[in-house]
Amino acid sequence: MVKEKECTSCKKRIINDPSSVSFTCPNCLEVIIIRCGECRKKAIKYRCSKCKFEGP
């Protein structure tokens, strides 16, 4: 079973959002951060679930 992608900030499911991105945490490099286009546009903060790094 494949887990659906969801935004790390707002928890919205990412279905067909061409402006969404996913990247590894810039601090610990272990957790994948997923950002929807809306949170990116509004610069909503995200937090890594492992190291608690916060980014815009």
Image (cartoon, rainbow, N blue to C red):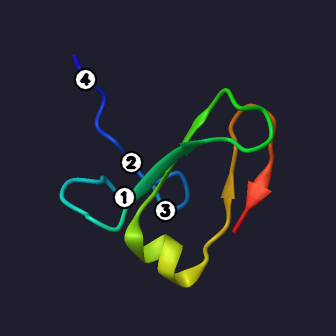
Name of the residue lying farthest toward the bottom: 42
Identify residue for label 4: 2
Helix, strand or loop at disc 1? loop
Question: Which amino acid lies under the numbered mark 4 shown in the image of this protein?
Answer: Val
Helix, strand or loop at disc 2? loop
Helix, strand or loop at disc 4? loop
Label 1 with label 3: CB-CB less than 8 Å? yes
* Residue 25 point in image, percent of width and height: 68, 41
Identify residue for label 1: 12
* Residue 2 point in image, percent of width and height: 25, 23
Mark 3 Cα within 10 Å, few/some/many (few <14, many 20+)? some
Question: Which amino acid lies under the numbered mark 2 shown in the image of this protein?
Answer: Glu
Query: Whole-Å distance between the Cαs marked 3 and 4?
Result: 20 Å
Identify residue for label 2: 6
Q: Above or below — where is 6 with respect to 31?
A: below
Q: Above or below — where is 30 with respect to 24?
A: above
Question: Which amino acid lies under the numbered mark 1 shown in the image of this protein?
Answer: Lys
Question: Which amino acid lies under the numbered mark 3 shown in the image of this protein?
Answer: Cys
Residue at 67% of width from left, 67% of height from top?
Answer: 45
Q: Is residue 29 left or right of residue 17?
A: right
